[in-house]
Image (tube, grey):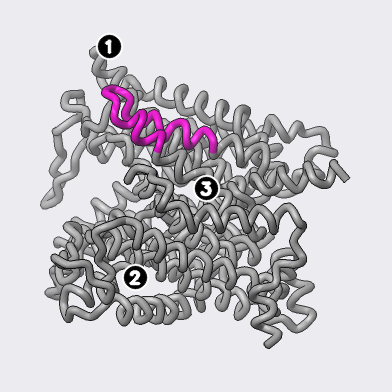
Amino acid sequence: MIILDGLLQGILMGLLFALVALGLTIIFGVMDIVNFAHGEFLMIGMYTAYWTSLLLHIDPLITLPACVIVGMLLGLASYYWLVKYLIRGPMIAQLFGTFGLMLFLRYLAQFLFGTDYRIIQKGLLVGKSLSVGPFIIDWTKLSTAILSLLAFILVYYLLHRTKLGKALRATALNKEAAAYMGIRTERMNALAWAIGGGTVGIAGGLLVNFWYVYPTIGLVFVMIAFASVAMGGFGSIKGAFFAGVLIGMIEMLFPVFGHLIGWDFLGPHFKFTVVYFAYFIIVVLRPQGLFGWTR
Amino acid sequence: MDTLKDVFDFRDFSKAERIGLLLFSIFLFVFPWLGTGSFVKAVMIQFLLFSLFGMGWNTIGGYGGQVELGKAQYVGIGAYTVALMMVWWKIPFWVSMPIGVLIALGYSFIIGYPLFRLKGHYFAIATICTSLVLQDIFINWKLVGAAKGIELPIHEHPDFLYMQFKSDNYYFYFIMVLFFAGLFYMNWFRKSKLGYQLRMIKDDEEAAESLGIDARWCKIKAYSIASAFVAVGGGFLAVYNLYIDPYSVMDLDLSIKIALMSMLGGAASMWGPIIGAAFLVPLDRFLGSWLGGQRGLIGVDFMIYSALIMIVSAYQPRGIWGIVEQLRRRGK
């Protein structure tokens, strides 16, 4: 029973991880660049939801459009003001460039909001839970999972069923050929950053309902997102989804197993460690990821 | 004999560079007598330490071209070995530091073997992961002090065996000796067989392999050299600070700083890591003490620092030394 409960909680949490990883994998797939600042985008999404709901006295769920818009603007700004220049350089410069962005946003948040831990305390769903048989599910987590699923379906539809998505995928496959076909690849790059920022913005808006926000929260989530993206294969949306859910389950089940086999020292404080470890094992044994496409 | 000649032979550098190095060495030797305050002295020690770290990173990250972002775990191994051996068994620094380096070497081979199956982004993130795993283990491991860290026993009298001195000058000279040892080693390394192989791998790995170079093995060797460098610095850090915890010696920020300084100065060049450290360490410390102390300005120093990182990465990814070389070529 405890395992089933862990599994359920893991899937709910995993859907959120998947949503965070979605933006990262789209940006990577289209531009071949790793965005270290992704966790900080999440953090800003969280602060957006927190402050708009607090200052405007509205329910945190209504603030989600604001989070999407802020995330998109952030993505676009990062692309046009920084990443556009970074992609001319070698890979290491790209890594450090986005890393610099990460530090900048983190300390900007610290400067503006201080280091306090903040969480949304009242809202339509906050603190309420649903009991289905023996399981107790927080409404906030359930709604997060459902909205994350919706976002995935939407993005999948956008990429695979619309002309715009086709252009985006063409850019990802071969930039030069796409440019010859009349696709404005620069705009596609910007679009990838906008989608990436938007999805992670909504993830932040959902997360702040049950997770404390503070300026350095990004690192934990960006590492999990890296792990999901790498497990699923860089650039693969399906992969990011399943890997995110898988990581959620690993993270929730690991302490449970530790408890069951009597190794209590493998407690919850190692739950992220095991994710990093799993990443390491998976990329070493299967470098293209579980669903990766070989280039 | 040829090896020895290579170590001390700086003739292939230009005259200006050699004179610069000479002046810089003289400056280092007389620095403790210049009567500067303890803060400046501490900054200088940090600078030399980070130059040493950077030189180590430069073997794999610069010459080898591998984006390695997990060097902090070896700082941690070096520091923890020295600290724990001193606390548990009272083993002197001069014994425990080489043991720490050996442990770091062994660990780097174990980690490096699977790690170098990976390339590009996968590799970069995997190095971060290994470092974070080790940090998490140390944060939760009660035996080694967990998150509280360990304090080294303080000796009442200065003790050379345990590297405990009243004055910072001794620490300065000690790290200076390490710095020059590193410098001479790097001078040899860049002309060694491994050095040339690594540069070839960086340029074109497939071509290198077709010429019979075992790319993976070369990278592992360079990686462990880098780890040894960093572990020496870690051991020094333990006796210098007399207190270590997983956050100060194993943090991701430290790994990033090590790599960043080399890159800012100019990766794959002899002077790059030194220039980078000479630029960033004082900037970091002075900004920190100037702005960090003022109320309401928490984090502004890091914002300036990170803005600089972004500008350099966007406009001059080859670093400060890249600018110098560009100017020189234009002058000719």
Q: Which mark is residue A15?
A: none
Residue B228 screen position, x and y as percent: 46, 73
Residue that carries the numbered disc 1 in the rendered image: A56
- B195 relative to B291, above or below: below
Mark 2 Cα-neighbour bin, 10 Å: few <14, some 14–19, many ≥20: many
Residue B123 visible in rendering: no
Q: Residue furthest right?
A: B332
How far, Cα to Cα, is label 2 from label 3? 25 Å
Task: Estimate the x, y position of residue A100 in percent, counting from the top left.
Answer: 50, 39
Residue B76 found in image quarter: bottom left
> Residue B244 vs residue A146: left or right?
left
What type is the residue that disc 2 sits on? Ile
Which residue lies most toward the top here? A56
Amino acid type of disc 3?
Ala
Tell me the kind of residue under disc 1: Leu
Residue situated in front as seen by the camera: A21 or B317 = B317
Query: Which range is magenta?
Result: B286-308
Q: Are marks 1 and 2 on the same chain?
A: no
Q: Which chain carries label 1?
A: A
* x then y, percent, for residue A77: 56, 26
Vertically, is A236 above or below B13? above
Kindly identify which residue carries mark 3: B278
What residue appears at the point 51 percent right and 71 percent down from the top-left corner?
A: B115
Q: Of the numbered discs in the image, which one, if any, rests on residue B77? A: 2
Question: Is A188 or B198 nearer to us in this picture?
Answer: B198
Q: Is mark 2 on a helix, strand or loop?
A: helix
